[in-house]
Amino acid sequence: MPRKFLVPTVAALSVAVTTAAFSGGHGSPEEQVIGARNALMTLYGFNSGILGGMARGNVPYDAESAIAAAENLAAAASMDQMHFWVPGTDNVAMEGKTRALPAIWETPDDYAAKNQDLADAAAALVATAGDGVEAVGAGMGQVGAACSACHKAYRGPRI
Amino acid sequence: MPRKFLVPTVAALSVAVTTAAFSGGHGSPEEQVIGARNALMTLYGFNSGILGGMARGNVPYDAESAIAAAENLAAAASMDQMHFWVPGTDNVAMEGKTRALPAIWETPDDYAAKNQDLADAAAALVATAGDGVEAVGAGMGQVGAACSACHKAYRGPRI
């Protein structure tokens, strides 16, 4: 299993859920966990959007900007996932509040591998983002493939 | 200026705002930038909440969980800030949509220093989070001080 997807023990999960309630965030502990996941996905999308815009030629390529976005995407994708996937926070238990399919918890090793694919693609893009718009396009192809593979398997319908 | 707060050039900012429009996110480019900032703050809060809950003794201390939260907080706080602070996204220009005061753009070096204080406090906590609940409490004191200093100077009223 990739190091960064530490499937938490039940004890650790209890800690996560309970402590989340003291974070000062909004909603139930489960809603706060979902909010944190959504925040992570927002950062994936924001940084991917900057890079994708360059790759599609919608804006001038800028090396410094591309590298910054790639670094942030890699940092987000490399976060330890242990607190993000608390049991009871799928789209059946939390209907209308998340698109996370129960399959994530049924095949956690595969989920972890798919997340690692994104982390690897982002890390590769950090190394090449300064090499020009074609390099960004090639790297974003790998990032996009990782996004799609995970969404296809583990993301439910829009809510 | 701390390395990670790269005050963007006007050209880079144009890139950021324009590309954000192609990210597939919701709202205007400026709203997407604000959404990304809010996502970052959500991740600060979520991970700080886990650590703060342990420090206050509300839940049993768990070393693995504490380290994971500290690592994620450090990763978030160390992100390159260049795309997050686009001019025109303060709480005057975007009234009711953000709490970011114009002072951020008026004294960017001080803002950057305060952000670096958080990154430094989080990095220190990564090193000590496994040492027990008292270490987490001490480390969270530094994290909380960094949060408060920045909010006092640069965060406007609730919206």
Image (spheres, coloured by chain):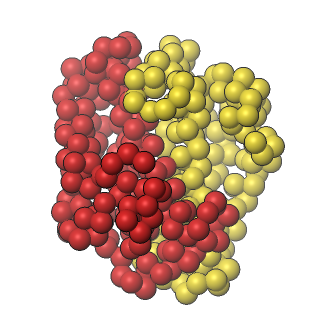
Chain colours: A red, B yellow
Across and down, in percent, residue A35 comes to: 51, 56
Q: Is residue B22 visible?
A: yes
Across and down, in percent, residue B113 comes to: 66, 42
Which of A105 and B82 lies nearest the eye of the viewer? A105
Left or right of A17 on screen, residue A4: left
Question: Residue A83, located in which quarter of the rendered image?
Answer: bottom left
Q: Please name the residue shown 61% across and 71% down the image.
A: A21
Q: Is residue A84 visible?
A: no
Q: Please name the residue shown 31% across and 73% down the image.
A: A7
Q: Please name the residue shown 64% across and 71% down the image.
A: A22
Image quarter where the N terminus of chain A lies is bottom left
Vertical order, A139 against A43 (above or below): above
Vertical order, B44 against B70 (above or below): above
Across and down, in percent, residue A43 comes to: 44, 43
Vertical order, B28 against B121 (above or below): above
Question: Residue A110, located in which quarter of the rendered image?
Answer: bottom left
Count of numbered labels shown in the rendering: 0
Question: Residue A3, located in which quarter of the rendered image?
Answer: bottom left
Across and down, in percent, residue A133 comes to: 27, 19
Q: Please name the residue shown 22% across and 48% down the image.
A: A152
